């Protein structure tokens, strides 16, 4: 569980090239959900970015949706949604296996249905058929749907020659206690939104669209802090109470795309993966009873950062570079040699970097009152052999945090680039 993470931010979503601001998907017009406001509201709710942005059009005399509800991500684009957006308040991860007898033709039809549904729901519309009305009163709420292919998908569809080398199974790690029934899968879908009903609505629609072509292999539910819940924009905390992130790669950095996305040329990946990325998914249980028995000082030594503000133990603020050579009066390193933050620094791992976009989870308590809770770890990279794998190997060899977490499920998925207008996700693979 590397320390890098996406800060809790929300920015307005730009329309696709050639579209005007406020456009909905083609032919949709103004969404019935986007026209609905909160009757009797006396003010505007500010998003985490500190401003009211992304308001939907509303009829004269009606109260517009809050910024939280009206924020919209775009389905069509260079990359799929749900990768570079800020953390979302609610998430669902779900893997499917193709049904017996289903192959390339059925997979193509399924991805076409899913893409149509994703485009409609992300624009604030209902599903094209048999909509459940669960999200009738809400706006898009930054909904994103992201689709990927597992290693087994290619043999099921006769596309083995198009399987990327980067999709080879992850190596075994000493901290793994993996449940195979909750790992991998032919197809993977990530759903995120800032409203729980909007997220569930999308999950149900995707499941119904699967019909007889695919069946659910596993499904997990997660959450993050709701944007706007803090007085100012700040890095999110995980269930251990730590600020989880600070040093995630930023889109403004010159090598961001190189680290996170497969290039359109000069790559060993097949052409259909251009502008795509690889998602590593891990269900990481936090042993909270053991963790919470530690003193504050012991917790901070495990992480290498102050719990209160995320500053490195070597001093400064959350964004101050960590001084790995600083020692105390006894000659001991101020940041312990096995501290999580020290081990995961890119300059300690040959520059290996990942874009983390996790969700916390809580699945209740066992008979002894022990919480089943932790992190639905999702990270993105152009090549897992250059991103997640070297970092996890380093953590495997001596991370102080390892004794307080347990990796219980795992998956690796090839996530193709975004669908252009008129295309569905994965079309260049399935029809190439």
Image (tube, rainbow, N blue to C red):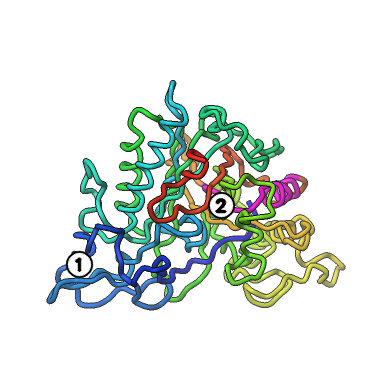
Q: Residue at x 61, y 57 (%)?
A: 260
Residue 229 visible in the displayed image: no
The picture places residue 286, in percent across and down from the top left corner, at 56, 46
Q: Residue at x 66, y 37 (%)?
A: 168
User: Relative to residue 70, is residue 17 drawn left or right?
Assistant: right
Nearest to N terminus: mark 2 or mark 1: 1
Where's residue 110, x and y in %? Answer: 39, 37
Which residue is depicted at the point 37% across and 43% down?
114
Which residue is situated farthest in the left direction here?
61
Q: Position of residue 362 (x, y in %)?
A: 45, 46
**Residue 393 on the magenta segment:** yes
- Which of the pair 167/358 is nearer the observer? 167
Q: Secondary structure at mark 2?
A: loop
Local crowd at mark 2 within 10 Å, few (<14), some, or many (≥20)? many
Residue 276 has which mark?
2
Residue 38 shown in magenta: no
* Separation of residues labelled 2 and 1 (CA atoms): 36 Å
Q: Which residue is mark 1?
A: 37
Label 1 crowding class (10 Å Cα cut-off): few <14, some 14-19, many 20+? many
Residue 347, compared with residue 282, is above or below; it is below
Q: Secondary structure at mark 1?
A: loop
- Residue that lies at the very extreme toward the right in this rendered image: 331
Looking at the rendering, the stretch of residues picked out in magenta corresponds to: 374-396
Q: Position of residue 322 (x, y in %)?
A: 73, 70
Pointer 2 and pointer 1: residues touching (CB < 8 Å)?
A: no
Q: Do we see residue 175 in this rendering? A: yes
Image quarter of residue 42: bottom left
Query: Across the whole image, how many numbered discs are drawn on residues?
Result: 2
């Amino acid at each position: 569980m590397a320390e890098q993470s996406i800060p809790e931010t929300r920015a307005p979503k730009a329309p696709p090239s050639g579209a005007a601001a406020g456009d909905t998907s083609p032919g949709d017009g103004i969404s019935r959900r986007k026209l609905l406001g909160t009757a009797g509201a006396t003010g505007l709710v500010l998003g985490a970015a500190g401003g009211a942005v992304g308001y939907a059009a509303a009829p004269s005399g009606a109260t517009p949706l809050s910024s939280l509800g009206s924020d919209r991500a775009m389905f069509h684009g260079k990359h799929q949604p749900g990768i570079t957006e800020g953390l979302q308040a609610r998430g669902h991860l779900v893997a499917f296996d193709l049904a017996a007898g289903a192959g390339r033709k059925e997979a193509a039809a399924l991805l076409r249905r899913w893409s149509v549904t994703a485009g409609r729901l992300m624009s604030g519309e209902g599903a094209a058929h048999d909509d459940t009305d669960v999200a009738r009163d809400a706006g898009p709420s930054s909904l994103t749907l992201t689709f990927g292919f597992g290693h087994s998908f290619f043999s099921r569809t006769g596309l083995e020659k198009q399987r990327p080398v980067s999709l080879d199974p992850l190596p075994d790690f000493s901290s793994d206690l993996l449940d195979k029934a909750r790992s991998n899968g032919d197809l993977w879908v990530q759903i995120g939104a800032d409203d729980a009903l909007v997220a569930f609505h999308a999950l149900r629609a995707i499941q119904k669209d699967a019909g007889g072509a695919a069946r659910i292999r596993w499904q997990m539910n997660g959450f993050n802090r709701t944007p706007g819940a803090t007085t100012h924009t700040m890095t999110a905390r995980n269930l251990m109470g730590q600020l989880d992130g600070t040093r995630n790669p930023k889109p403004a950095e010159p090598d961001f795309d190189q680290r996170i996305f497969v290039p359109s040329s000069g790559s060993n990946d097949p052409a259909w993966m251009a502008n795509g990325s690889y998602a590593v998914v891990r269900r990481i249980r936090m042993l909270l009873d053991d963790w919470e028995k530690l003193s504050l000082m012991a917790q901070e030594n495990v992480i290498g950062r102050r719990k209160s503000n995320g500053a490195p133990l070597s001093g400064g603020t959350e964004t101050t570079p960590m001084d790995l050579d600083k020692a105390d009066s006894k000659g001991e390193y101020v940041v312990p040699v096995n501290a999580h933050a020290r081990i995961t620094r890119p300059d300690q791992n040959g520059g290996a970097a990942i874009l983390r976009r996790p969700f916390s989870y809580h699945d209740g308590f066992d008979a002894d009152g022990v919480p089943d809770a932790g992190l639905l770890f999702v990270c993105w990279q152009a090549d897992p052999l250059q991103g997640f794998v070297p970092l996890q190997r380093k953590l495997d060899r001596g991370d102080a945090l390892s004794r307080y977490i347990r990796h219980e499920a795992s998956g690796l998925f090839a996530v193709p680039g975004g669908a252009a207008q008129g295309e569905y996700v994965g079309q260049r693979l399935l029809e190439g």
